[in-house]
Amino acid sequence: MVLREAFFPDEVTCIGYEVDKDPQSIEELLELCANAALDGLSLVAVATDTGEVVATVFCNLQEKPTPESTEKTFFEIFTEERCKRPSSKAMMDFMVQLDAKCNYFDRYGVDCLCEIMFLGTKPQHRQKGLAKLLTKTAVELSKKFKEGPIAPLTIADLGPNYAFMKPRKPVTKPPQLCTALWSAVGSKRCGAILGFTVLEEISYGALIYDGRPCSDRVGAVTTCEGVALKI
């Protein structure tokens, strides 16, 4: 699987919060991706000669929290209900905090967005423009989303590993905004080319996990960007 081979071992936030060293944390975050897949906007790139999946991106539709929905975001609810491991919880808490700093819903005056996340490409297929292609396609599909998933999936479609997941009501509002948290040089470059605006930037040197800055584990002081593109 692309995420196991090319995202969790290499992504800066995963390394900083030691997700890459905790198989149970990885399983919890894979459940997040499976949940996002139900929105019907996630994408894969497949090698035409072998049929191998070589790159992925997961797209999660999120509606603006309301008093009736307890004023919590999808990520907050998922963290509370599904994240038990310190590493996965810390990573999700970071995603929640950066999303909150970006304040997408109020800043842009929208009530539904598509968060583009967990963009990964297998090492031997990098530098071929696949991340840019998947992100561009995700934006284009988000623009076409009107009254439901373009490629609807059910929990049964996810396979036996996710049979335990609870059905959820699909989001039917069309997204008015695409958002992402870019940590890799390549994803930042891809976002800039596609016209995403950087709203917030956080240094991994300022993020502390288990008593140490995340940058210590990464091996460099780099940043994560919270970005958005109105569609």
Image: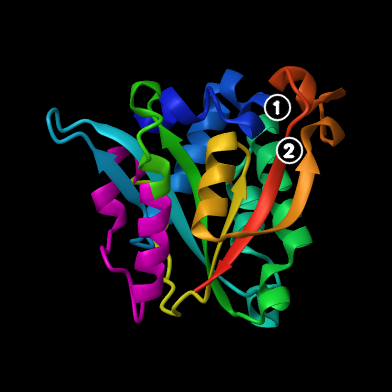
The answer to whether the residues at label 2 and label 1 have Cβ atoms under 8 Å apart is no
Q: Which of 215 and 153 is in front in this view?
A: 215
Q: Using a 10 Å C-alpha cutoff, classify the residue at mark 2 as few (fewer than 14 neighbours), some (14 to 19) or many (20 or more).
A: many
Q: Where is residue 34 in the image (x, y as percent from the top left)?
A: 40, 47
Q: Is residue 116 left or right of residue 225?
A: left
- Do we see residue 165 in this rendering? no
Q: Using a 10 Å C-alpha cutoff, classify the residue at mark 1 as few (fewer than 14 neighbours), some (14 to 19) or many (20 or more).
A: many
Quadrant for residue 220, please give it. Answer: top right
Note whether 16 is above or below 99 in the view shown: above
Q: What SS does tag 1 mark?
A: helix
- Distance from label 2 to label 1 (Cα)? 11 Å
Three-letter code for the amino acid on which mark 2 is drawn: Thr
Q: Where is residue 175 in the image (x, y as percent from the top left)?
A: 48, 74
Residue that appears at 34% across and 81% down: 147
Q: Mark 1 points at which residue?
A: 16
Note whether 124 is above or below 128 in the view shown: above
Three-letter code for the amino acid on which mark 1 is drawn: Gly
Q: Is residue 59 left or right of residue 229?
A: left
**Colouring scheme applied when the structure was drawn:** rainbow
Residue 80: numbered disc? none
Q: Does the magenta stretch include residue 168?
A: no
Q: Which quadrant is the N terminus positioned in?
A: top left
Q: Does the magenta stretch include residue 138?
A: yes
Between label 2 and label 1, give the one nearer the viewer: 2
Quadrant for residue 72, please give it. Answer: bottom right
Q: Mark 2 points at which residue?
A: 223
Q: Which of 155 and 75 is in front in this view?
A: 75
The residue stretch that appears in magenta: 133-162
